[in-house]
Image (cartoon, helix red, strand yellow):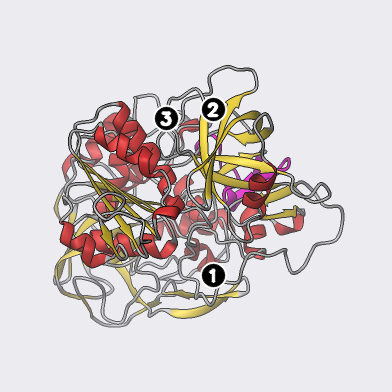
Amino acid sequence: MATLVSVNVGMPKDVAWRGTTVRTGIWKQPVTGPVTVRRLNLDGDGQGDLAGHGGEQRAVLVYQLESYRHWQQYMKRDDFVHGQFGENFTVDGLADDEVCIGDRYGIGEAVFEVTQPRVTCYRVGLRLGEPQMAALLVSHHRPGFYMRVLTEGRVRAGDEIVKIASGSETMTVAEIDALLYLPGHPRQGLERALRIPALSPGWQTSFRALLADADGDSQSESGNSGLTITAPPPAWPGFRPQEIVGIEPESASIFSLTLASVDHEPLPAALPGQYLGIRLQPDPQGPPVIRNYSLSGRPGAETYRISVKQEPHGVASTYLRQHARVGDTLDVAAPRGTFLLKDADTPVLLLSAGVGATPVLAMLQALAAQRSPRTVWWLHAARDGANHPFAEETRTLLARLPASRSFIFYSAPRDTDRPGVDYTSAGRLELERVRDLQPPQDADAYICGPDTFMKDMTEALAACGLSASRIHIEIFGARSAITPGVVAGPAPAPHQPARVPGGRAGPSVSFTRSGLTTPWHPEYGTLLELAEACDVPVRWSCRTGVCHTCETALVTGSVGYSPEPVELPAEGSALICCSTPTADIGLDL
């Protein structure tokens, strides 16, 4: 008979960590006497990061005495106390390789159902003083698990744990955890997992993504689509020279460059929505500059077309505007990106502002080339006709589609701009206007433009009933940071590290979205830590090569890992939380 050994609770508190402050509820303390368990939590308990912890599916975290003994022996420690692993229930029994998702248990007055393994998180390592703990929990098959509360009631240490029902498919916590985080992801296992109604929605989403990619023989090069959005591997590593064979103005500030292979062979096909990395040397004495430009031409064409907006102080765009000539060559990285048009039969909404039209224009090109029967809406915002790129081109493409609609908004039309011809409405494209159009709720929406535009359009489409999974955005600049639990202040602009370690510098590291290049020193530890020292916006969660939140496109160069990640990222990407450069590199950060 399994037993509830200790009930542990703790409210979130601020903890100093690596020069920052983390808000966390990982510190749990044993409670004497009865505690009431409610649908979302135990009385007296809380979580600092509700995005990754807590909620109905993760109301109660369970960890086992047997795993305590395992870690005491493995780590050669004897200082553990109940609640050490952040668990609410410390139990004798209920091993991860025996308990199944969907199993139901009665404890005291309450009834529980097992929903998922523990989510990997750096904070358990913070609590234990062992930075690799998140990876160790997975690799040692001892994650612990969450339960939801079916019947609220009081529990107390010493209560017997009575199994009431078994979960369908009899897949253990350890099996489910390995199915997501460890290499392999066999189709049969994914199908079984998705037949378990008790499995939490987040894990179901991850397994559906893996199932969509599964072919019965998963390869590590494909990455883990259950943890991050993956893209096909790049057609070539690093940069290759390509010749400029055409330069065309598209608006007052936007121009297009058409690129061809220098050996006159067709270029590898790009996917609609992808971008190219371009390496330039505006200052012969300075470091190279790498910028990303979306492909705006027809996917599958023998050439590539990129469109560039000349920014007032843009180093790369100004250099291209002033110096690029037909016949010149540019160093070009292979097409990359995860902002991709889905192959489906649902309606498509393409929303853009300014030069944000470029990736969605490639999607429109692809749909027109197929004479797609899908409902296609084109919504574009510009200042006026002089600043409306691709106007005639988009009209021609939309005319080829049997179910297309176009809505053009000029915020300040000129006297010569023709309403009903050049534009649909005067004014900005805002929430009320989108709502009035009544877009189809089963559409997939693709949005690109300034940050405020994408934020407004995302909110507008959500207000119209589109689910978050159907709304896709493409960000030209640095992406928003994901730093769970860290109490964030104002974000400074990316900069050179405040302190440069002594000794000989290593390879150069370019953060392409941030426009920053800096030399590597081993004292930084990892590429993630270097990025943090430069205040480059980063994304991470486990910091040990498990969760793939930090997976970043590797534009050029190569990395080494220490420790080795639990599963390698997709080819052409790097897990920056546990990697260092082995050559000059460019990271899409």
The residue drawn where x is 57% and y is 66% is: 129
Q: In the rendered structure, are the residues bearing label 1 and label 3 in contact, judged by CB atoms less than 8 Å apart?
A: no
Give the residue type that dot 3 points to.
Pro
Work out whether residue 93 can be spotted. Answer: no
Q: Element under label 2?
A: loop
Q: Is residue 256 left or right of residue 338?
A: right
Task: Work out how far the residue at label 1 is from the one at label 3, CA to CA, in angstroms.
Answer: 60 Å
Q: Which of the image's four quarters has the N terminus?
A: bottom left
* Residue 195, x across and y down, in percent: 18, 40
Q: Is residue 180 left or right of residue 23?
A: left
Query: Is residue 520 shown above or below 244?
Result: below
Give the residue type that dot 1 points to.
Asp
Front disc: 2 or 1: 2
Q: Element under label 3?
A: loop
Residue beneath label 2, please? Answer: 235
Front disc: 2 or 3: 3
Task: Work out how far the residue at label 2 is from the one at label 3, CA to CA, in angstroms.
Answer: 14 Å
Task: Work out how far the residue at label 2 is from the one at label 1, CA to CA, in angstroms.
Answer: 52 Å
Residue beneath label 1, please? Answer: 79
